[in-house]
Amino acid sequence: MRFHNTLTRKIEDFVPLDKVVQLYHCGPTVYNYAHIGNLRSYVFADVLRRTLEYSGLEVKQVINITDIGHLTSDADSGDDKMVKGLKRENLPLTLDGLKQLADKFEAAFKEDLKHLNIETPHHFPRATEYLKDEIELVKILEEKGFGYKLSDGIYFDTLRLKDYGKLGGLTPLDESQARVGIEGKRSSRDFVLWKLSHDDRLGFESPWGKGFPGWHIECSAMSRTLLGQPFDIHTGGIDHIPVHHNNEIAQSEAAFDKPLAHYWLHNEFITVSSEKMAKSEDNFITLSTLIDKNISPLAYRYFLLQSHYRTPTSFTWESLEAAENAYKRLMLIMRLLNQQAPSDPGKVSEKYKQMFTEAIENDLNTPEALAVVWKMSRSAGDDISYADTRATLLDFDRVLGLKLNEYVPEVKEIPKEVMILLDERAEARRSKDFKKSDEIRDKIRRLGFEVNDTHKGQEISRI
Ligand code: AMP
Ligand code: ZN
């Protein structure tokens, strides 16, 4: 198995550290709903987990929940995003208000994961439940001389760490830029470890006074407590590379003199009109928007699988519709396979499994894996039996997670409207008017049925 490691900028063979492969994925800041761009990060993480499991490895997976400490800029300026959320939702600026806000959006996030058939991680730690570990880590950094105090908090001294920024993505600073930022900072790249509260109601007790942990220290502390250090694979969106992940590495490695994680994998963005989809922009599309439009979240999962996770992907309603049609066709194929071989369980094809595995284990090449799905489906009844095609598709679905076993079984009752269109279509085909016959097929599709032309004539099934 091979992955692209951001740390070395190379595709590398994956060698697990131990028997259980440990994964940490930076989770959402729960001040708002996730948009479908954010959800790409978790579908990608899910495909990674499923691929490791498919190859026979055991996995322990963590997705954290950030419920304080993430400022509107990933560096240290602006409001805390959670405080922004409290104001928007008219919730009290208290710890209780904070909990209500986090509960609401954490539940919504978990619902999104369920809709996308993302396996539940083994841990969903909340930053505010790991304060002891976060404070402990800041204390270690202070004792080792990496922390310094300013009026608004404890900062990490990036100039003290020789290889600060080794994950890359940082633009060089000239002398004047290096000094810009919060007054007293030794470098503008220094970041907060513990932020002192302006507002006492939102602070937690600490040796430095009431406040809250920095966003980066939360991930360093939670991953260490739940997975240890080093662990195998850390993931996130590419926006996390320059600041958040460089800072996680800096803190954890400065504190314990060993690597934080061995492999760093990053997904590219979902864009709209060439712009990154973002919570602050007006291109914010949630999974509920898709569900309201009667589009299955699994059609969006299919849409994501069509492109490699390291390719920026432009979202348009037309491209989503094309993915939805392909997904529906795949479900239809499952139904037809079942009709052809209702009682034979079949067996997994070694030939196609090998092709599929090669694709997916090559840095999670899901477009290539889907190409294998279609190649095999086209050969069904030819060089592979119907029953074996079905068994192999269900085996691939352990990685794809498209719920291919949940196709709607054949329906007996066909509405009159559809019957009339079927007659018209049969007539069009008899008179070789294929343009009209295709138009009628589209009309029938819009009514929720698919027509297939077989040697016995037109066969109809529900989409
Ligand atoms: P946040 O809740 O803002 O911390 O983001 C959650 C995850 O979504 C992070 O891994 C981000 O890197 C990722 N992300 C944010 N915007 C996008 C986008 N437009 N496309 C793909 N991933 C994104
Ligand atoms: Zn993180």
Image (cartoon, rainbow, N blue to C red):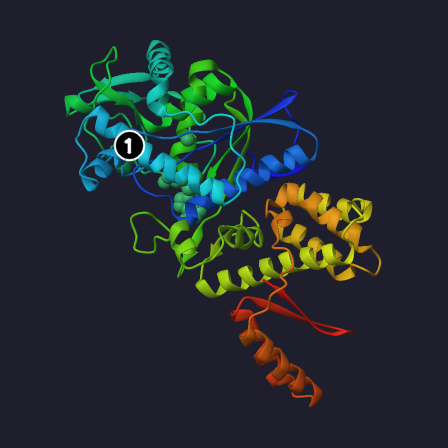
Q: Amino acid at mark 1?
A: Ser
Q: In the image, 352: left or right of 307?
A: right
Element on which disc 1 rests? loop
Give percent across and percent down for residue 38: 42, 44
Residue extending farthest right:
383
**Front one among 344 and 313:** 344
* Residue positioned 61% across, 68% down in the render: 450
Give percent across and percent down for residue 306: 58, 54
**Front one among 217 and 315:** 315
Give percent across and percent down for residue 50: 61, 37
Q: Is residue 244 above or below residue 397?
A: above
Give percent across and percent down for residue 17: 63, 22
State yes or no: Cβ of the residue under disc 1 lies below 8 Å from any atom of ligand 2.
Answer: no
Q: Quadrant of residue 233?
A: top right
Residue 397 visible to the viewer: yes
Q: Quadrant of ligand 2?
A: top left
Q: Residues within 10 Å of mark 1 (few under 14, many from 20)?
A: many
Q: In the image, 17: left or right of 269?
A: right
Tag 1 residue: 188
Q: In the image, 433: left or right of 444?
A: right
* Residue positioned 59% across, 44% down in the render: 401
Residue 169 visible to the viewer: no
Q: Quadrant of the C terminus?
A: bottom right
Q: Quadrant of the N terminus?
A: top right
**Front one among 341 and 44:** 341
